Amino acid sequence: MTGHATGGRSRPEPPPAAVFEDVIRRALAEDLGTAGDLSTTASIGAEVRASGRVVARQPGCIAGIGAAALVVERVAGGVAGSAVDVSVEVADGDRVEAGTTLLSVTGSARTILTAERTALNLLGHLSGIATATAAAVDVVVATDARIADTRKTTPGLRAVEKYAVRCGGGSNHRFGLHDAVMLKDNHLAAAGSITAAVRAARDRVGHTVTITVEVDRLEQLGEVLDAGADIVLLDNMDPPMLRSAVEQVDGRAITEASGGITLETVQQVAATGVDVISLGWLTHSAPRLDVALDLDDA
């Protein structure tokens, strides 16, 4: 293995196998339709064998390597003569250099070629998220701030995209609307006030569910803290405002910075003393990692 491990971090727990199975099933269904891989079955005989490697064309952090291998297995699907031996050469969370072999395949050429794009799509997309996350984590490593994702995920892929964030060393924000309370500006407007919104939420969910309140002005902080919010989300504040907010909160709630934070500005944000920095672009805009399948010459 030419990649290196997670630098002392524990490896993230992957989603249940059924999550990846469902994603792969849907991805293959939209690619193969009812007629299968016309290009491959029309040009490659069932008896043809091939071998090759999936390689990283650029340095990055890996996520989804097991899913890529599983795609190949599912395409083979028990059909006689379609088997492929897959050797996984790296682990999710590994950081690799350009040219690193990620997995090797040997067996049915039809299976390998049919599985190629779905496997690379998943691996490249998830590794791109992990790579973007790792870059942000590296920038703030000397601070106490944690890098977190948001709910700005691809519909149907949230579980695997949030897993990719963990592979890059980041933390997951709430998974969905169902596992934490976040009161944003429209909630506060509809409820009538910060105090009314927090009290109503606390009465409904009890003490075991966290309540986050989003604010965009320092004048709102006193009411948020008096209402008993667990987390205050400091939205679209510049570093001087964030520093003032952290001082005003003074440990009475978790502070989270969000909104308009880039890789170029995240270190300045972390230096203000916020506890969490949530970055929506980790999942909605991270460029895919360039990975490719290279078949050996016949």
Image: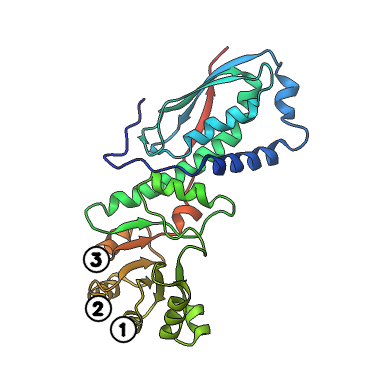
Marks 3 & 2, CB-CB < 8 Å contact: no
Depth check: 196 or 75 in front?
196
Q: Identify which residue is drawn at 41% across, 74% down.
A: 214
Mark 2 is on which residue type? Gln
Total residue callouts: 3
Front label number (1 vs 3): 1
User: Farthest residue toward the bottom?
Assistant: 192
Label 1 vs 2, first from the N-terminus: 1
Q: Relative to residue 64, is residue 227 depicted above or below?
A: below
Q: Is residue 145 left or right of residue 63?
A: left
Q: Identify which residue is drawn at 46% across, 72% down.
A: 205
Q: Percent from the top left, x then y, of residue 18?
A: 56, 41
Which residue lies under the disc numbered 3? Answer: 273
| Residue 212 picture quarter | bottom left
Secondary structure, mark 3, is loop
Mark pair 3, 2: CA separation: 12 Å
Marks 1 & 2, CB-CB < 8 Å contact: yes
Q: Relative to residue 215, is residue 289 depicted above or below?
A: above
Secondary structure, mark 1, is helix
Q: Is residue 112 visible?
A: yes
Q: Identify which residue is drawn at 37% across, 53% down.
A: 171
Q: Is residue 285 visible?
A: no
Q: Identify which residue is drawn at 38% across, 57% down.
A: 148
Which residue lies under the disc numbered 1? Answer: 222
The image quadrant where one finds the C terminus is top right
Q: Is residue 54 left or right of residue 47?
A: left
Label 1 vs 3, first from the N-terminus: 1
The image quadrant where one finds the N terminus is top left
Crowding near pointer 3: few (<14 within 10 Å), some, many (20+)?
A: many
| Residue 107 picture quarter | top right
Q: For residue 248, which numbered disc appears in the image?
A: 2
Q: Is residue 87 left or right of residue 73?
A: left
